[in-house]
Image: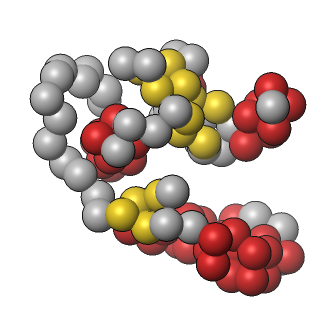
Amino acid sequence: MTSDYCRQETEHNLAKLAPEAKYIWLSIIRPSLVISNTQVVLDRPLVYRAVKDRPIVISALHYQANYLLTLDRDDFHDLLGAEVYGLRIRTPGEFLRSA
């Protein structure tokens, strides 16, 4: 599951990854995703200075996700820690190693 905002961010950042990333995204990952509307209102406080990434965290909390998977360690893991309100923050590699 992802939000429409996350989908847009992913597609924007594909050029920064290996050449085959776009193919893998379009042919394998994107077709298997459920894309929900981005949420921007939260029923509890969230102190998080990465303004452009707040909708990602708020949407994950709103939809009661177990994990937020991201390659952006600086703006997520390093600022929020390993979890926020029970939402575990991991890189895809960390998530796969823990499975």
In this picture, residue 53 sits left or right of residue 77 = left
On screen, residue 95 above or below 25: above
Position of 25 with respect to 75 (left or right) is right
User: Residue 87 location, x and y as percent?
Assistant: 46, 26
**Residue 9 in sight in this render:** no
Q: Residue at x 52, y 33 (%)?
A: 66
Q: In which quarter of the image is residue 64?
A: top left
State whether residue 91 is above or below residue 89. Answer: below
Q: Residue at x 17, y 35 (%)?
A: 42
Q: How is the image coloured?
A: secondary structure
**Which residue is depicted at the point 29% across and 58% down?**
38
Q: Which residue is drawn at 54% across and 25% down?
A: 88
| Number of numbered discs on residues | 0
Viewer-side residue, 33 vs 49: 33
Residue 82, can we see it? yes
Q: In which quarter of the image is residue 60?
A: top left
Q: Is residue 21 above or below residue 68?
A: below
Q: Nearer the viewer, residue 91 or 29?
A: 29
Please give left or right for residue 67 compared with residue 61 in the image. Answer: right
32 in relation to 76, above or below: below
Quarter placement of the C terminus = top right
Q: Where is residue 91 in the image (x, y as percent from the top left)?
A: 69, 37
Q: What is the quadrant of residue 25 in the picture?
A: bottom right
Q: Where is residue 11 in the image (x, y as percent from the top left)?
A: 56, 73
